[in-house]
Amino acid sequence: MIRLDSLLGAIAGESLKMLRRPAVYVLGAILLAILVLISYLLGWFFLSYPPPGTRFPEGLNPAELKRAFYPINLVRQALSNASVLGGVLALILGVLTVGSEYGWGTLKTILTQRPARLEIFLAKTVTVAGTLAVFAILNLAAAAVMSILLGLVDQQSLTFPNAVQVIAGLGTTWLIWNWYAAFGGFLAYWFRQSALAIGIGLAYLLVVESLVFGVLNSVGGTFLQTVEKFFPGPNAMALILSFGSATPTVAQSAPRPIVGAWQATMVLALYLLAALITSAILLRSRDVT
Amino acid sequence: MDNGDLVVETRGLTKRYGSGILAVDQLDLVVRKAEVYGFLGPNGAGKTTTLRMLMGLIKPTAGAATVAGHPPGSPEGLGRIGALVENPAFYPYLSGRDNLSVIARYSGVPRAHIDDALNEVGLLARGNHKYATYSFGMKQRLGVAAALVKEPELLILDEPTNGLDPQGMLDMRDLIRDLGNAERTVLLSSHLMNEVQQLCDRIGVIQSGRLIAQGTVDEIRGGAELLVRAAPLAKAESALQKLLGADAVRVQDGVLFLRVDSTRAPEISRLLVTSGCDLSELRSSERSLEDVFLQLTGEESTP
């Protein structure tokens, strides 16, 4: 049974730890730096000052491609940070939140206070989810600032996406990052440490979900497409692609989502739920030495 | 004895690890309200495993326990217990005060308790410094402060003087003595005999996971004895057995030990002289807890 006062106390304790932890700020700074540098400045600079001899895909020109950097596309551009790179950082946050407790031996310190193990687990989950919500908002805010700046530099009209798209974009980013963080947390509960959990988490994320699926996709085949539909990474990508492309011309050469947005959301939610339930079982059932 | 006076009670508490190691074997432990109980045993005897079970960190393989009136690890019980189990463990990037703040928030106790606890262990001036910068002794004291933040009825301290320098040990013992003076119950685990002898009202001795003795320090040590050196030994032993009974006389390393009141020393002296024995030494002899401990645990005393 969950007691609200006990849960709120544990959330207050976890929030203090999260607020004071330098690693959280480092992860947030890296996240924003990736967005600003890779998703905006690098691409904009390349399209504004293309090296001599650069050839663009047929029907596409730099001006058309640069529309991705203007305010109307800020949600799509912010979502570019939600997949692999943002996922890696969310996974590390999930691992650190749990794995450090084992490494420092502080898990036994908090387990011998008043809250029950399930309340402590929920407090950690809520705190990580809250932190990722802040990250998602900052990510979108940074995209808004960058898109306004680049729009002004290029003397483009500052048209913004509607509120529904903004909220959907925030929700999508938050859901994807929560899955990766929950996966990282699960690995940390399982291995009772950070190093192995980060190693295995990154190996899965970068080797299985990025490299293997990338190579197999280039080979093609309906069997692979069916298999992919059951993995979280391709579903996260499908959810991001469901927001469409910057312009209709760009959309013609963009990859198609393997499943619809609703199905991708459900698959990710199920993976998130499974990771949380198995983590809770691990924490509740195992000895802490 | 009223069961309400029992703060810790275990019945057949057993922990066997998957590898087959029997860490704690059928332990029956009783700690009464407002006493300082010494849990004494050599390294690896099962003290920390027992304390972990009492705190709900590990599950017993068999047996049962109640701690502060509740099953181990239950939120109701944990709210009434302050513990330092093994080494102090805190967040290195937080200050001492923030570490206690995390614990206070977790435990739902007022923040005012934080400064009180820091003051009690003498860390108030260093409260805002990062935990990572603390010396081992300061970390140990912060561990005690963390146990005190809840103002617990039961304080469980696992080898709190481990790793401290002599002055640090003295300070820690003074602190524990103060903590045990009020209504608070203290369960102190240690392998240091003099520490337990100085601080504890009652003790339990654990060896290879089994409780081999439990009682007050005097009960465990046995009463005082008279030490007698006399020659010839056999003649003196025979005369004393006639006077005191065979059970009251034992010989160890050529010395006679008599379990009698020391006021009978003149009578014994006269008897030995009139029996034709040469009496070279007659004095009161108290066994130290260390002697008893080594005898109980079957270890040889080193000179």
Image (tube, rainbow, N blue to C red):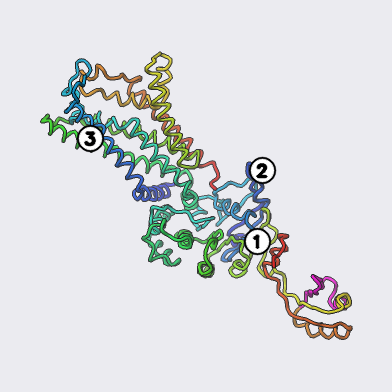
Q: Secondary structure at mark 2?
A: loop
The percent coordinates of residue A24 (x first, y second) are 34, 44
Judge from the rendering whether residue B192 lies leftward or rightward of residue B303; answer left or right: left
Amino acid type of the residue that numbered disc 1 sits on in the rendered structure = Gly
Label 1 sits on residue: B204
User: Which is in the foreground here, disc 2 or disc 1?
Assistant: 2
Residue B158: x and y in percent read 56, 58
- How far apart in space, not on screen, are marks 2 and 1 (Cα)? 25 Å
Residue nearest the viewer, comparing B145 with B54: B145
Q: Nearer the viewer, residue A100 or A259?
A: A100
Question: Which of the labelled discs sits on residue A143, or is there none?
Answer: 3
Residue A97 is drawn in which quadrant?
top left
**Figure quadrant of residue A148:** top left
> Are discs 3 and 1 located on one and the same chain?
no
**From which residue to which does the magenta span run?**
B239-260
Q: Quadrant of the C terminus of chain B?
A: bottom right
The reply to whether the magenta stretch includes residue B249 is: yes
Name the N-terminal-most of marks 2 and 1: 2
Asked if one can make out residue A233 in the rendered structure from this viewpoint, the answer is: yes
Q: Quadrant of residue B191?
A: bottom right
Identify the chain of the residue marked 2, using the numbered disc in the image.
Answer: B
Q: Marks 3 and 1, how far apart in space?
A: 66 Å
Q: Is residue A217 above or below residue B77?
A: above
According to the picture, the residue beneath numbered tag 2 turns out to be B20
User: What type is the residue that disc 3 sits on?
Assistant: Ala
Q: Which amino acid does the dot numbered 2 rest on? A: Gly
Q: Are marks 2 and 3 on the same chain?
A: no
